[in-house]
Amino acid sequence: MAAGLGGALLLGGCGDGGGSEDEATPTASAPPSPAPGDSPSGAAAGKLEGSWVATSGGQAVALVITGDEAGLFASRGTMCGGRVGEAAGKRTVRLSCGGGQEERGTGTVDSVTATTLKVTWEGSAGTETYTRAEGGKLPPGLPPAGPGS
């Protein structure tokens, strides 16, 4: 699991390169446009930019933010793409996930420091605290990969 998630972290920093879209991949479609009132500027990303990991519901979750774009990958196969913006003076992460995944659609950034990011999702994921992954490496303390991961 750590190797696969580490690969997702490394891929999160790569550009698309303009190749063909793979219709079987949920993130192949364009990310959702910011809602009215959202500011898609890079300033909204600010300290949010980077790779963040958390454990939630027994799975590893990686949130990768580059500029105003965001991607989320979970160890059980969830993949989402979207944008970082600002609404009503608060930084937001808006994701579109394939397969009807509704756990993390819109999240409000509660706090961000050099090492932690706290996001409250409108979906069933609730509030999650992420740890910054430096240099494409997973931070210590994640659960080990095991059967059913």
Image (cartoon, helix red, strand yellow):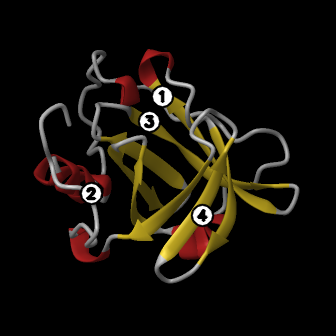
Q: Secondary structure at mark 1?
A: strand
Q: Which residue is mark 3?
A: 80
Residue 16: % across, % down: 29, 44
- Kindly report the distance in space between the C-alpha atoms of the residues bearing marks 1 and 2: 17 Å
Residue 120: % across, % down: 66, 51
Q: Secondary structure at mark 4?
A: strand
Q: Crowding at label 4, few (<14), some or many (≥20) Cα neighbours within 10 Å? A: some
Amino acid type, residue under disc 1 in the picture:
Cys
Q: Are marks 1 and 2 in contact (CB under 8 Å)?
A: no
- Kindly report the distance in space between the C-alpha atoms of the residues bearing marks 3 and 1: 4 Å
Identify which residue is drawn at 50% across, 23% down: 101
Residue 93: % across, % down: 62, 49
Specify whether 23 is left or right of 86.
Answer: left
Q: Are marks 2 and 3 in contact (CB under 8 Å)?
A: no
Q: Are marks 4 and 1 in contact (CB under 8 Å)?
A: no
- Kindly report the distance in space between the C-alpha atoms of the residues bearing marks 2 and 4: 18 Å
Q: Which residue is mark 1?
A: 97
Amino acid type, residue under disc 2 in the picture:
Leu
Q: Which residue is mark 2?
A: 9
Q: For this rendering, which residue is in front, 10 or 129?
A: 129
Q: Which residue is mark 4?
A: 118
